[in-house]
């Protein structure tokens, strides 16, 4: 890997610097367990509705939307709009690449698959 390829995504680092955003990413790993249910959309297909995340986080809608925007802009989440609702899902491939790059940058040994 070249030096350019090993550059850690600083936007993603800033995104995970917040404990609230880390919580959101953790909850979204297993949305059925962590959010229970949502009225519209399937967790695995559409993702998690902002209002469901808001309820779990105990924060205002604008605060949750701001956190989700940071995670989305860092490419750690994908977003889908259905009618007036926004749904978010983890981008597992982007998260995997970020973690690999971070592991390489810190010169840590990777766990065996």
Image (cartoon, helix red, strand yellow):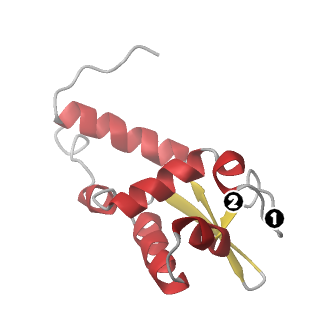
- Residue 3, visible in the rendered structure: yes
Q: Earlier in the sequence, mark 2 or mark 1?
A: 1
Q: Percent x, y for residue 28?
A: 58, 52
Quadrant hosting residue 46: bottom right
The residue shown at (16%, 34%) is 106
Q: Percent x, y for residue 81?
A: 70, 76
Would you place residue 69 above or below residue 60 in this image? Answer: above
Q: Percent x, y for residue 31?
A: 66, 51
The residue shown at (52%, 59%) is 77
- Residue 76, visible in the rendered structure: no
> For residue 93, which numbered disc appears in the image?
none
Would you place residue 106 above or below residue 28 in this image? Answer: above
**Left or right: 57 in relation to 31:** left
Residue at the disc numbered 2: 47
The residue shown at (16%, 40%) is 3
Residue at the disc numbered 1: 41
* Circle 1 SS class: loop
Of the pair 30 and 111, the residue shown nearer to us? 30
**Left or right: 100 in relation to 75:** left
User: Residues at badges 2 and 1 in contact (C-beta under 8 Å)?
Assistant: yes
Of the pair 40 and 93, the residue shown nearer to us? 40
């Amino acid at each position: 890997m070249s030096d350019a390829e090993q550059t850690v995504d600083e936007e993603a680092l800033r995104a995970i610097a917040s404990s609230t955003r880390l919580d959101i990413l953790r909850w979204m790993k297993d949305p059925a367990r962590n959010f229970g249910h949502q009225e519209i959309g399937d967790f695995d297909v559409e993702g998690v509705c902002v209002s469901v995340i808001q309820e779990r986080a105990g924060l205002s809608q604008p605060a949750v939307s701001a956190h989700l925007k940071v995670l989305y802009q860092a490419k750690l989440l994908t977003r889908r709009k259905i009618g007036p609702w926004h749904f978010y899902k983890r981008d597992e491939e982007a998260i995997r690449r970020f973690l690999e790059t971070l592991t390489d940058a810190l010169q840590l040994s990777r766990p065996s698959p």
